[in-house]
Amino acid sequence: MWRSRTARSCALAGKNREDISMSRSSLLAWSAVLLLVLAWTAAATAADASPEGEAQAILQATGVRGGLVVHLGCGDGRLTAALRAGDAWLVHGLDTDPAAVAKARAAIRGQGVYGPVSVDQFDGTRLPYVDNLVNLVVAEDLGGVPMAEVLRVLAPEGVAYVKSGGAWQKTIKPRPANIDEWPQYLHGADNNAVARDAVVGPPRHLQWVADPSWSRSHMAISTVVSVVTAGGRLFTIEDRATPENPFLPGRFALVARDAFNGLVLWRHELADWEPVTRYIKDIAIQLQRRVVAVGDTVYATPGLAAPVTAFDAATGVVRRTYAGTERTQEFAYDAGVLYLVIGDRMNAAQYNIVKTYAGKGVSLGGSDPKAPFDGTGWRGAYAPETLDKPDAVCAIAAVEAASGKELWRIKNIHAYTACSLAVRGQHAVVQTGQGLVCLNPKTGATRWEVKKSIPSGDGTEANTVVLGDDAVYAQEGKTLCVYALADGSQKWTAPITPCYEKPADLFLAAGAVWTGGVGQPTSYDQKTGRKGDVIQQRMTGPMGHDRCYRNFITDRFYINSKTGGADFVMLDGGKEFPHHWARGTCGMGVLPANGLLYTPPYSCQCSIDCMVNGFNAYAAEPGMASPGQDVPVQRAVRLIKGPAYGEIGNRKSEIGNDSDWPTYRHDGTRGGATAAEVSPRLAPLWKTPFKTVPSAPVVADGKVFV
C-alpha cells in the first residue's frame, strides 16, 4: 500500500478612541530597529502633473497594493480621490483647515466617490487612528505631526511617503519579530497549532470590525469555514449569501482582507462548496485544510472538486492551476512543496440521517443527538446532503509549488484519518485505521510503519497527529501515543480527551506537551511523559459546554473556551482572563496571529445574550499581568463647535416625531414600534439604488437618512 511512484471592513476602527493599540511604540522597540528610508526626487512624480498621474507615481513608488491610505493636507481633494486606485482601497484625507475640508468634500462628492474616499478635520498633531492600522500615509508636509506619530498608526510593513526638502522619502515600518502568522489550518505542516506570538493577549481593544455581522444559521454549516494569515493579509473561505434565510443556497468565496484593518482586498467566488444544509456539528475538518498562505501567494481549492490553485495574495489573480490535483480533500505546505490528500474524504457525518432512520421508529426530535434540528420540516432541510463514503479511498501526493511538478504519489490508501498528514523536515507521517506510517517527504518512500488498529472516529472528530523535533505525538482515540521519529518505537502514552465535537487539543508549547479538550489543560514532559501542571479554570460559564472547535495556545496562554468565548489562561501560574463575549465561529474558533485575536462571526445560539457580533479583531493591553488590571484611557474634550453652535437657543428638537423613526429601533427604549398608522395596502412609492450595503434607515422631518 505504501509504495511510491517517484516522478507541490474596516471602517476607520477606533477613529474616535484614544490610545487604543495592538502594541505601544515602546513594544516595537523603535530605538533598536533600523527603518528602511529611501529617497526619491521630486522628479519621480513630475512626469504627469495631474492628480491621477501623481497618485499613480506615489502608489508605484511605495509598492502598496491596497488597504487604508491616509492623505495629510488633502487640499482640494483631487489627489485624495485619485489615491483610491480601485475597490481594494479606502482613502481618508485629513486637514486642519475647515474650509479646505469642505472644498475637498465637495470635489470628492462631485466625482461620486465619497464614502470610499472621505475627508475630516483633525487637530494637526495626533492622527485619529489606533496603532498599526494604516497601510500608507502620504504627506507633502507633516506640519505638526511628528514622524513617531506616523509610525505609530502605520501597520507593520506599512509605508510613509513624506516630502522633505523637495524630495519624497519612503519609510517602511518593519514587522515586529515577536508577532506570528498562521499560514495554514494547524499553523504549520507539522500540525503543531501554536502561535509563536508574544503580543497577542487578552482582548481589551477593538482593532477592527468587519462583515459578515451574522452567521447564517445555528444548525447549518458555518458561514466562515477557514481562516489563515500571512504577509499582513487574512484569508477566509466564507459564505457571502444573505443571512436572512438559511435555506437559500450558499455563495462561498475565497476572501482576502488586510490583517491589520480588515479591509476586503479581493474576493474569488468558488464554483461550489459544501451545501449550507450540512449539520454544523458534522462539518468535515478536511474542509478547513484547503487554504494555505505563504508570502505573496495563497493556495486554495476554488470548489469542492476543483484542483489546487495558486493566487496572487495581493490581487487574487490566478497564477497557476495544478494539474492532477482535482478532488483534493486537504493539503499542507512545507519547504516549497504541496502535500495533498486526493480522492474520497473521510466520512464526516451520520450521513443521510432522515433516510437512515425513516420507518425504524427512531425519534429524531427532542434531545436526540442525531437530530439536526427540532421541528418537522426542518430535519430534511438540514440533513447532510453530501454523502461521504464509509470506505473512503484516497491518494497522497507531493507537488512542487513553484513548477507544478509532481514529485511522488501513493495510491489506494484506505481509512485515512482526516488531517493527520504531518510534515516536518525529513519526515512525513500519516495515520490510518491500520496504523502509523512515516515517509520520506522527498521521495514518498516508507521509513517505518507501526501496524495496529487505531480508533479514528469520523471526519469531524478525527485524531490529531503532531510532529516534534524527535517524536511523533499521535492521538489514538482517548490515548496519546508518542513514537520516536527515527524508528517508530513507542516512547510513552497518556490519556487524552477530544474537544467538544472536534479533535483533541495537542500542542508542543513552552517546552511541554499540552492536552486539553473537554478536560482541563494538562502538560507532560516531552521526553518522558511525566505529568506536569494541570490548569484548573475556575470560570466555566455561561456556556453549557466547551465550544465545538479545537482550542488554541501560545507560549504564554492556553486560549480555552470553557466560558463559550476566548479564555486566556496563563500557562505559568494559571491566572485566567475569561471572555465569554469574544466568540469564535462554530467549528472554526478564533485565531491568534499578527499580535491580534480574530473572531469570525458567531454561529451558535448558546448564551447569545452576552457576545459581540461581527467579524472582529481584538488587541491586547500591553503589560497586562492580572485580570483585574485597569486599562488606562486618556480623556480629552472632543466637541468641535461649529460657526452655528452659539445660535442654538433651544437644544430640544422642535421637530414632531409622531410619524418619524429618528433612531435605530425607533427610540432609546429600543421598542421597535410606532404610533403612526401604515396602510396594509403597500405599493412602491420610489426607489434609489445603492452601490454599497446601506445602514438601517432612520426618518425625520420628511427625510430618510442611511
Image (cartoon, rainbow, N blue to C red):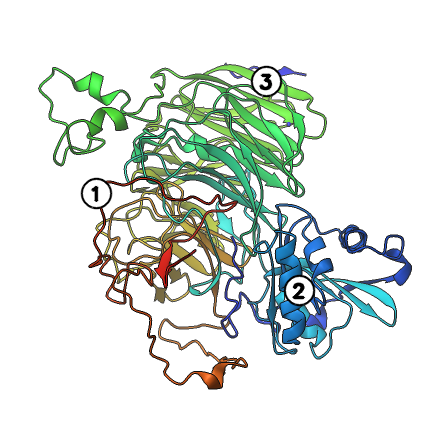
**Position in image of residue 408 (x %, y %):** 63, 19
Q: Quadrant of the C terminus?
A: bottom left
Q: Which of marks 1 and 3 is nearer the N terminus?
A: 3
Question: Do we see residue 407 in this rendering?
Answer: yes
Q: Residues within 10 Å of mark 2 (few under 14, many from 20)?
A: many
Name the one closer to the observer, 45 or 512. Answer: 45
In the picture of the structure, the residue carrying the numbered disc 3 is 409
Q: Is residue 472 among the parts visible in the rendering?
A: no
Under mark 1, the amino acid is: Pro
Mark 1 and mark 3: Cα distance apart in space: 67 Å
Quadrant position of residue 217? top left
Q: How crowded is mark 1: few (under 14 residues within 10 Å), some or many (20 or more)?
A: few
What residue occupies the far left of the structure in this picture? 361
Residue bearing mark 2: 104
**Residue 680, labelled with which disc?**
1
In this view, the residue in front, 414 or 639, is 639
